[in-house]
Amino acid sequence: MESEILKGLNDAQRAAVVGYDRPSLIIAGAGSGKTRVLTSRIAYMIEQGVKPYQILALTFTNKAAAEMRARIEQMIGTSSRYIRMGTFHSVFSRILRENADRIGYPQSFTIYEPNDVKNLLKTIVREMNLSDDKYKPNVLASRISYAKNSLVTPGAYLANSQAKNTLITPGAYLARPACLAEDRQAQIPEFGNIYNEYCRRCKRNGAMDFDDLLLQTNILLKDCPDVLARYQELFRYILVDEYQDTNYAQYIIIRRLSQLHGMVCVVGDDAQSIRSAGPRSRTSSPSSRTTPRPRSSSWSRTTARRARSSTRPTRSSRTTRGACRRAAFRRATAARRSASCAPTPTARRPKWWSRSCATRSAPRATAGRTP
């Protein structure tokens, strides 16, 4: 007898839900039912005997997590409350509190808000007698955030450097001449010292910022093999929504946790990536990044291809805004030409306008001569 969870799903969605026993990369467009597939997959897994506490489901907003949990509860009842589900930062903050003493933090550590971060940076800049005009809190906070989300590695911080495979400390960051040269070029040569002092004070105050929740989780899993082994055994199935928006720190955490069982399901749409522009776009889309894979040969992209072929919008439905403007311009131009043969003013002609259009316009009247 067919499960009630599978009713109403098309063939591609059904294949993505039923194939929970292997890694899956599901790429589909907006409005194609990605969230429905993810929630149905979780509910189907529990219906087939998977323990709810063995499932780790990660989203990007608390609203999305609450909506997913409500949908799953409608399908299978109250057992959904035992699923470890939430945003990256909320889930990993709980893991850090459970193991805070292993990385030198109190269990009741404080999480700094952005204003707290800026105030601390202002204090550090003032105590170091640096210029407020050059060392602006917003710039420093953004630079620190990028460094932490890149795990503060040479490959993440510098262009054309080594691969991002090791964590380094602020002290190691200071020792790299290339980093110092980049800071001097940005007219903030003391950024390394500011970054070092900022991390030192945060730890002394028993506090983390939002980016620390990812960085410190990576440090915990890297430096404490027993903690990593415990969570690898606990989270047998890992599911990630909006995978195209994950950054490098989040990706490494998923990869570490999935090394034992390899049961990873990621859902996303590379056309909606918030990092679709800029130098990091190549490593941000689901189709371009190396998705965490198991050591076995059971990995398959067939589910993703089927889901893409039937749920991804057609090219016409994904027409860019510029193409729409050009099409509207062509229609308006055709309407004007049909009403009058006057040539289009040169100032309004776009780059793609053909000069042959001018030859089809009416002949000009010659001054002092009757046409």
Image (tube, rainbow, N blue to C red):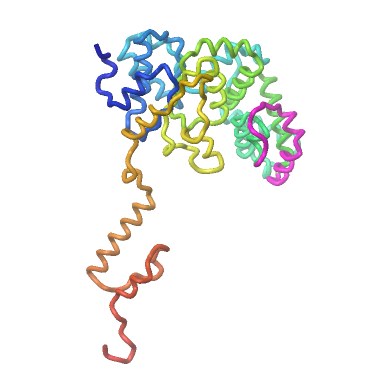
Quarter of the view holding residue 332: bottom left
Give residue 2's position: percent from left, percent from top: 25, 14
Q: Is residue 103 left or right of residue 33?
A: right
The N terminus lies in quadrant: top left
* 1 within the magenta span: no
Q: Nearer the viewer, residue 295 or 282?
A: 295
Give residue 219's position: percent from left, percent from top: 64, 20
Q: Nearer the viewer, residue 333 or 11?
A: 11
The residue that appears at 36% across and 23% down in the rendered structure is: 16
Q: Is residue 342 left or right of residue 177?
A: left
Name the residue furthest front: 297
Q: How many marks?
A: 0
Q: Is residue 49 left or right of residue 164?
A: left
Give residue 319's position: percent from left, percent from top: 35, 47
The C terminus lies in quadrant: bottom left
Give residue 153's position: percent from left, percent from top: 66, 31
Quarter of the view holding residue 117: top right
The residue that appears at 39% across and 20% down in the rendered structure is: 66
The residue that appears at 32% across and 25% down in the rendered structure is: 13
Q: Which residues are magenta?
A: 160-187
Residue 56 versus residue 252 in the image, above or below: above
Residue 349 versus residue 159 in the image, above or below: below
Residue 51 versus residue 134 in the image, above or below: above
* 171 within the magenta span: yes
